[in-house]
Amino acid sequence: MRIGTKPSEEQLKYASVLQKVGLGGLALLVIGFVVYVSEILPAFVPVNEIPQLWGLRVDEFVEKTGMPTKWDWVPLLRYGDMVSFLGIILLAAATLVCFIAVLPAFLKKKDTPYTVIIIIQIIVLLLAASGIITGGH
């Protein structure tokens, strides 16, 4: 963007949504941490066990704790340590949420190239989040 030019409606919308999603994700991380360490909800992995588990590789951590992988953590939201996952998910989904938010503006303008690019990116992000496609794993 050149000096003196104004951001487009789409850029402003994207930035506004990104700010809200970012702050919401950070708030959920803080809330999740407080819920976990204050033991408001029972923990799946007790706080006092974390120092012994911290240096383990992921596969060792999963084996030792029984921690679920992929989307299998969702039913465990009744545990305090799982609440933080909501913040992580929201932050990880920020791009997807922003694309969905700006898509109507590009459709309204009949901006076909950007509309197609955004729709393809939304599809790829949804497929990746679902586990249907993975990046080199």
Image: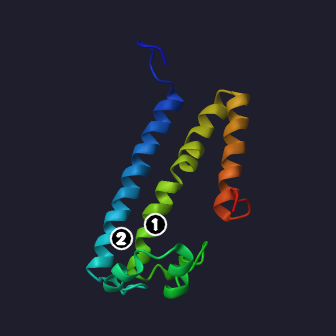
- Is 94 on the left or on the right of 129, as rendered? left
Q: Toward which corner of the image does residue 112 lie, by quadrant?
A: top right
Sort mark 1 into few (<14), some (14-19) or many (20+) by Cα contacts within 10 Å. some
The residue that disc 2 covers is 32
* Identity of the residue drawn at 57% across and 38% down: 102
Element type at mark 1: helix
In the rendered view, tell whether residue 80 sits above or below residue 99: below
- Where residue 24 appears, x then y in whole percent? 39, 55
- Where residue 19 appears, x then y in whole percent? 40, 44
Q: Quadrant of the C terminus?
A: bottom right
Hey, what amino acid is under mark 2?
Gly
In the rendered view, tell whether residue 96 sits above or below residue 40: above
* Identity of the residue drawn at 34% across and 79% down: 51
Hey, what amino acid is under mark 1?
Leu
User: Foreground residue, 68 or 50?
Assistant: 50
Sort mark 2 into few (<14), some (14-19) or many (20+) by Cα contacts within 10 Å. many
- Where residue 5 appears, x then y in whole percent? 45, 15
* Identity of the residue drawn at 48% across and 58% down: 90
* The residue positioned farthest toward the left in the image shown: 38
The residue that disc 1 covers is 86
* Identity of the residue drawn at 53% across and 73% down: 58
- Where residue 118 appears, x then y in whole percent? 66, 39
User: Foreground residue, 55 or 120?
Assistant: 55
- Do callouts 2 and 1 mark residues in contact (Cβ within 8 Å)? yes
Element type at mark 2: helix
Question: Along the polypeptide, which appears first: circle 2 or circle 1?
Answer: 2
Query: Which colour assignment does the render follow?
Result: rainbow
- Is 37 on the left or on the right of 137, as rendered? left
Q: CA–CA distance between discs 2 and 1? A: 8 Å
